[in-house]
Image (tube, coloured by chain):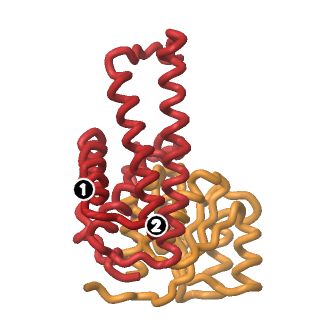
Amino acid sequence: MLRMGPPPGEIRSMSILDIFGSRLKLLIIMAKAYLKRCPMGKFRKQAIIENARSVFYHSLQAANETATIRDFDLKTQAGIDFTGDIHEEHLFHQRVQLLAVMATAMAEGRPFGHFREKALNDNLDRICETLIFNFNVNNANFLKVA
Amino acid sequence: MSQVKIPNVKIAVIDGDIMVRDFVTTVLMYCVNRDVMSFDNGMSAWRYIESTGSPDIVISEIDVAGLNGFELLAKFKEKHPGKKCLLMSANPDDEQSARDSGADAFLAKPVSINDLFGVVENFIV
């Protein structure tokens, strides 16, 4: 039997944050695969649109929560003070939402010129920097077939 | 280029948590570029397997309503011994039981993108 996932001591139910983080990483891989000219069939396009919608929604919700905490000077239940990172967190979510819009556009077959691709690349780089996430599309052979 | 192990693969995902179910379905749909069936309980999945058509791979949470993952695995393997059944769980105690019951893989939660890519690479492409 093949075994995948975390070691026994780290097994737990998946939280909303787990799902958001994983979906965001998937969106990054989808965009990188597009830039590498990996083939996109009907269901891949559908998966990109669904994933982008989910990431956008959760990012928007997270950004709104951050703004509410800032605007009303609220404290989180855990008592964490956001004041230092609130600007960076806001910008990060704006970038994530932009990525979701870009991914939807690529799945819908909207034209992508040189500068749009550059903007997509730059946005991916900045998000990956924040997440400390790196993925090489060349290592995923299944992405090269549709 | 790797060889496709199961061409035009049919996959069924079963999990009572809609967030997890949709996430796993989206990742697999993207990876294989095929439609992926999803169910919120084991009984609906079994009805689909019996009536409509049999998936090549079943990925089921163990703790689901109707038929649980172990029961679904037993029925599926009895009907289709050559096909693959993978079990997911957030309970570490389920791992040994999954091994004993003949599961092809055990996916411990939280499931990551790499785990699901591993499923695709090991069983499909």
Q: In the image, which is nearer the foreground, mark 1 or mark 2?
A: 1
- For image coordinates 64% across by 85% down, the residue present is B54
**Picture disc at residue A118:** 1
Q: Is residue A36 visible?
A: yes
**Element assignment for label 2:** helix
Q: Nearer the viewer, residue B36 or A44?
A: A44
Q: Nearer the viewer, residue A49 or B73?
A: A49
Viewport quadrant of the C terminus of chain A: bottom left
Output the chain of dot 1: A
Q: In the rendered view, tell whether residue B104 sits above or below residue B23.
A: below
Q: Amino acid at mark 1?
A: Lys
Mark positioned earlier in the residue sequence (1 or 2): 2
Q: In the rendered view, tell whether residue B95 sits above or below residue B33.
A: above
Chain A's colour is: red
Q: CA distance from mark 1 to mark 2?
A: 17 Å
Q: Quadrant of residue A36?
A: bottom left
Q: Amino acid at mark 2?
A: Ala
Output the chain of dot 2: A
